[in-house]
Amino acid sequence: MDLKAQRTQLSKELDSAVRDVMDASAFIGGAQLRAFEQGFAAAQGVRHCIGVGNGTDALVVILRALGLGANEVVITAANSFIASSEAVTLAGGRPAFADCGPNYVMTAETLSAAIEREKKAGRRVRGVIVVHLYGRSCDMTALGAVAERHELFVVEDCAQAHLGMHAGKPVGGFGVAAAFSFYPGKNLGAFGDAGAIVSNDAALAERMRMLANHGRKAKYDHEIEGTNSRLDNLQAAVLNVKLPHLRAWTEARIRAADRYRERLANVRGVVVPAATPAFEHVYHLFVVRVANRSAVKEKLAAAGIDTGVHYPHALPDLAAYAYLETRREEHENASDWSSSILSLPMFPEITDAQIDHVADALADAVSGS
Ligand SMILES: *Cc1c(COP(=O)(O)O)cnc(C)c1O
């Protein structure tokens, strides 16, 4: 990615927005925050938005508001960033993992299998955190039906899926609540850590707003204990400048993905992500699979092309989750593919020439390896 491109494009507006906050010395809970919460709720088509400190806190606050009981199970994606499962533990629960299907996201089948496993082990399953990984929307229709059958709450981890859609509706509104991250590298990035919770449930939203701000109803009136996780006004000011551009940036990501797909269609040895209806994939990452990944990655690096791996280990394979004693066949796709996935350069400002250069270099690298 290229974080400097947006900074250059918007430098005047960003400088003046940040200066205004500093001049007003209103750093916490000011007008910029309220404006952003309203603007982001409108962008995602939901009623309520609560700015919080980061995406991980967003998930934790949601789970705490749902009253997760000690050791109750929340199922999440076997292939995700650790925040998706870490939040469950931080909220007092126990994570369990569902494998991914061919689109790298959880499916009705993999979710059902995980629920059955947990129930068989005698544990109480309370909910599921679906992850729209890489920006690819999960099939919320199918997953919602499974969750309903088992009376589970659904939380969406939208940290990689700003403005993503499923079946013509924006992600973030399918479950009881959803978490977003505005970490600088995300599709909408602040100048530091930042996040938000969205929900259509007024009572739950009120509770989450309290939990994120020391459980307070009004100043020094603490009905419950919460935490300190607020989106500050400087970050909100930056996000307010960027938000109006998010749609065009997302369209640019989709165009870039289409060009990659076109250029790589006839390259043997590279598995590219399937095409989707518009905005069902918002391409936070463009992830391909190749055999011999480390050799391919090195050849690309030698050609001046930086690539990433998201993520090198499936969550249940991490030392942090050894205690869960999962078996590999429970998350076979996630574990198998962790050694062949490769994230190609992807950011809104990427040029056709850059994409072609990457595609050509990748074709060379796989043919020679
Ligand atoms: C980035 C990310 C998070 C956590 O967001 P932070 O703002 O970094 O705390 C959670 N889930 C996924 C899938 C992410 O990519």
Image (cartoon, rainbow, N blue to C red):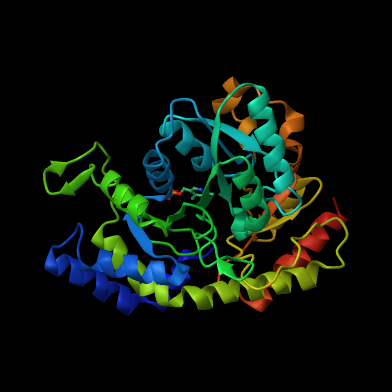
Can you give x and y, in whole percent of width and height, for residue 293 in the image?
A: 75, 47
In percent of the image, x 36 and y 62: which residue is there?
Answer: 48
Q: Nearer the viewer, residue 236 or 34?
A: 34
Q: In this orientation, does residue 298 appear?
A: no
Q: Nearer the viewer, residue 178 or 314?
A: 178
Would you place residue 21 above or below residue 294 in this image?
Answer: below
Would residue 259 appear left or right of 189 to someone viewing this image? right
Would residue 19 appear left or right of 267 to someone viewing this image? left
In percent of the image, x 57 and y 68: which residue is there?
Answer: 169
Q: Nearer the viewer, residue 149 or 236?
A: 149
In percent of the image, x 78 and y 71: which residue is there?
Answer: 263
Would you place residue 248 above or below residue 189 in this image?
Answer: below
Would you place residue 128 above or below residue 118 in this image?
Answer: below
Can you give x and y, in whole percent of width and height, for residue 311 in the image?
A: 62, 44
Can you give x and y, in whole percent of width and height, for residue 230 in the image?
A: 28, 51
Q: In this orientation, does residue 129 appear?
A: yes
Would residue 242 appear left or right of 230 to someone viewing this image? right
Would you place residue 165 above or below residue 325 in this image?
Answer: below
Can you give x and y, in whole percent of width and height, for residue 7 in the image?
A: 40, 71
Q: Name the quadrant containing residue 242.
A: bottom left
Quarter occupied by the N terminus: bottom right
In percent of the image, x 39 and y 67: which residue is there?
Answer: 40
Q: Name the quadrant containing residue 215.
A: top left
How many marks overall? 0
